[in-house]
Image (cartoon, grey):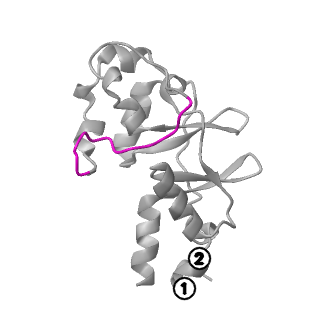
Amino acid sequence: MTAKAKPLAKILVRDIMRTDVVKLDPAMPLEEAVASFAELHISGAPVVDRAGRLVGVLSAFDIAKPENMRDGSVTPRSNEYALGDASPDDDGSYDGEVVFSMEDYSPEVLRRGTVSDLMSNEVICVSPDAPLKDVCATMVKEHIHRVMVTEETKLVGIVTSLDVVRCVATAL
């Protein structure tokens, strides 16, 4: 049964999660990660080590932090994970121009930095059997736009805010 055939209150993560997840390697250069985000029209991706373990998340917000723009330094991310918008706009709108415009970044940061330098180490994960209602509440509470779907320590999918909107639009 698909998410379309279920009432919203009965939808589980497994009904809407995407399993074709773009994954980043911790050693990947930041320049390559930014280019991937722009090419794929995404604003973040899980970071998975060579053993396949989920070790973090890199978002456009992590990259676009003011201290990483134009000052030539790489400031490693703290363990606090709160994905906000990549825009300084007060209305909370997402400004893709800020994120995907390579000229806004210090070339030194992009050339010498790696994904592990700026990724968030603490990742919000959910089970495929979690009710969508609970995932939405977590996303709102934590101010995040994506949750990783895991079984044990293995990444099995992702649910983004856009996935939730698609689900609601289909159910209406």
Q: Is residue 145 left or right of residue 2?
A: left
Of residues 152 and 83, the one drawn nearer to the viewer in this rendering:
83
Q: Residue at x 34, y 31 (%)?
A: 64
Q: At numbered mark 2, what does the secondary structure look like: helix, strand or loop?
A: loop
Magenta span? 79-91
Distance between the Cα atoms at labels 2 and 1?
7 Å
Q: Quadrant of residue 32?
A: top left
Does 71 sit above or below residue 163?
A: above
Q: Which corner quadrant holds the C terminus?
A: bottom left
Q: Quadrant of residue 24?
A: top right
Percent of width and height locating residue 119: 51, 31
Q: Residue at x 50, y 43 (%)?
A: 45
Q: At numbered mark 1, what does the secondary structure look like: helix, strand or loop?
A: loop
Q: Residue at x 63, y 68 (%)?
A: 14
Amino acid at dot 2? Ile
The residue carrying mark 2 is: 11
Main SS type for the magenta part? loop
Amino acid at dot 1? Pro
Please tell me the numbered disc located at residue 7.
Answer: 1
Q: Residue at x 49, y 54 (%)?
A: 141
Asked if the magenta segment contains residue 86, the reply would be yes
Say whether marks 2 and 1 touch (CB < 8 Å).
Answer: yes
Does 2 sit above or below residue 105?
A: below
Does 11 sit above or below residue 110?
A: below
Percent of width and height locating residue 115: 50, 27
Of residues 137 and 4, the one drawn nearer to the viewer in this rendering:
137
